[in-house]
Each structure stands twice: as C-alpha cells, then as structure tokens.
Amino acid sequence: MGTISSYNQVLIANMAILSFKLRHNDFIKELSEIILKYQDDYFVYTKFSLVYKDLFRIILERDHLGIRHKELYNEMQKNIRDLKRKYGSEFLEFQELVRDNDIGYNNIVRLILGESANDLCNDKM
C-alpha cells in the first residue's frame, strides 16, 4: 500500500466494510470469529500475519504456494468452506469487496475487527 494514495484507499475500503457489516451482520460476526480464531501474537504486536494472508487466499480461492502449516491451512479451508456454504451470496459479495479494495489482507482484517481508518493510516506513516 503506497503512502500517497493509501489514506483514500483505506477510507474507501472502510466505508465498504462498514456498509457490508450493516447489511450482513451475521456473516461478519461469524467471519470475525474465524479471524480471531487464527489471530497470532505476531499480529497483535505488528498488525501483520502470514496466517491472515493464507486465510484470505482461501477466501479468494487463490492458488497458494508454499503452505507453511498444512494442518492449520486445512482447518482454515474447512472453516471458510462452512462459511461459504451457510452464506453463499454474502460470501461472494465479500470476495468482491476484498478484490475491489486492494489495501492488503491484514488491513482488511484490522478494519473488520473495528480499527478506524485513521488508526490504520497513522500506523503506516
């Protein structure tokens, strides 16, 4: 994420996520539970996690090369498969939201978990 356009990108992504949360509260609640399930200490301290990169590759159905923790990855796949099965159209809409707001998976996670766009941008500067 570049520093010049990042603030506008983050604001746009934040508005999209807030709108999505209002329309699909149950989906976001379950997605947040999955996100928190895989939160690691590294994310807590640095606001970055390779685990979330893996999780969002599963969500976006992107190829994943070099799986670090096969058991964890398989568990995440099952959780996301269950979420997709339960919330088909909401899941597809969320995939589009993530694709349309290219601010990084970890930043998407931070916004979903309730950090403000200003806090996120202040950490980047």
Image: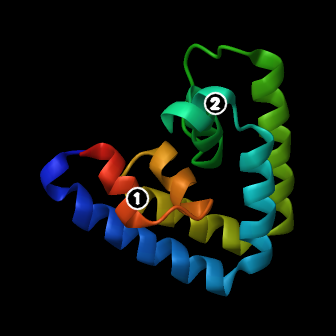
2 left or right, relative to 124:
left
- The foreground one among 104 and 85 is 104
Mark 2 sits on what residue?
Answer: 51
Residue matched to label 1: 119
- Residue 66 rendering spot, x and y as whole percentages: 58, 13
Residue 1 x %, y %: 27, 45
Is residue 19 visible from the viewing direction of this image?
yes
Q: Residues within 10 Å of mark 2 (few under 14, many from 20)?
A: many
Type of amino acid at the residue the image marks with label 1 = Asp
Q: CA distance from mark 1 to mark 2?
A: 22 Å
Q: Is residue 89 left or right of residue 107?
A: right
Residue drawn at x 74%, y 58% as measured from the top left: 31
Element at badge 1? Answer: helix
Disc 2 is placed on an element classified as helix
**Residue furthest to the left:** 4
Residue appearing at x 18%, y 48% in the figure: 3
* 91 over 54 or under it: above or below: below
